[in-house]
Amino acid sequence: MKFFRVVLVVALVSLATAALAQSDAQKSFDKMKTLAGTWEGKVTTDPPMEGMGSNARVQVTLRITSKGNALVHEMKGAGDPDDPTKYDHPVTMFYVDGDRLLLTHYCDAGNRPRMAAQTWADGKPLEFAFVDVSGSTQRGHMDHAAFTSNDANHHVEDWIYMMPGDKPMHAHMDLQRVK
């Protein structure tokens, strides 16, 4: 009988330890939260977008919300007024759901694609792959995102947008933290 009690105690301690261990998704999310702040930098697209010359700049704001359970990512042209009714101003929410780090992108195309991340290994980009989309994809949809943290004041974002006809458009943003 004593043996079974010892085994039961060991099993319960192991379960409690596993429950307290942080998931890879949570670790990746915690690392993403270190990007909170305002960022600006050059944006390039391939193929080139009409109206975006070689000096196109973007502003990205990341803000932790919901008692640390979500990260809000907002993009707009650097210098554009904060008027999402006139200017492209997509919002993306990052959050952990079970053992997955997900994002939902609220696109100006009127849809909401969801993507799931792989874990974020040091020196590698955090890649988000398409899961599903709600809303019309007639004007296209966001399909992939990658974040590379170079240091506390420099990160890179790569976004793939699937245009109508499944033609990919790649946006590359090289961002510096605004002090």
Image (cartoon, rainbow, N blue to C red):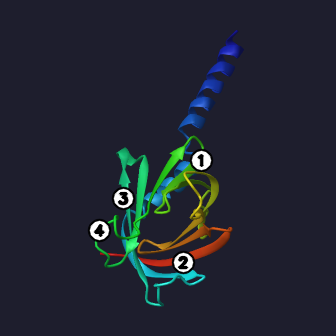
Q: Give x and y (percent) for residue 43.
A: 48, 81
- In the rendered image, the quadrant that contains the N terminus is top right
Which mark sits nearer the N-terminus, 1 or 4? 4
* SS state under label 4: loop
- The residue beneath circle 4 is 82
Q: CA distance from mark 1 to mark 3?
A: 20 Å
* SS state under label 1: strand
Q: Looking at numbered disc 1 in the image, what kind of residue is underneath it?
A: Arg
Which mark sits nearer the N-terminus, 3 or 4? 3
- The residue beneath circle 1 is 100
Q: CA distance from mark 1 to mark 4?
A: 32 Å
Mark 1 crowd level (few <14, some 14–19, many ≥20, 10 Å Cα): some
- The residue beneath circle 3 is 63
Nearer to us of marks 1 and 4 is: 4
* SS state under label 3: strand
- Closer to us: 169 or 96: 169
Mark 2 crowd level (few <14, some 14–19, many ≥20, 10 Å Cα): some
Which mark sits nearer the N-terminus, 1 or 2? 1
Q: Quadrant of residue 89?
A: bottom left
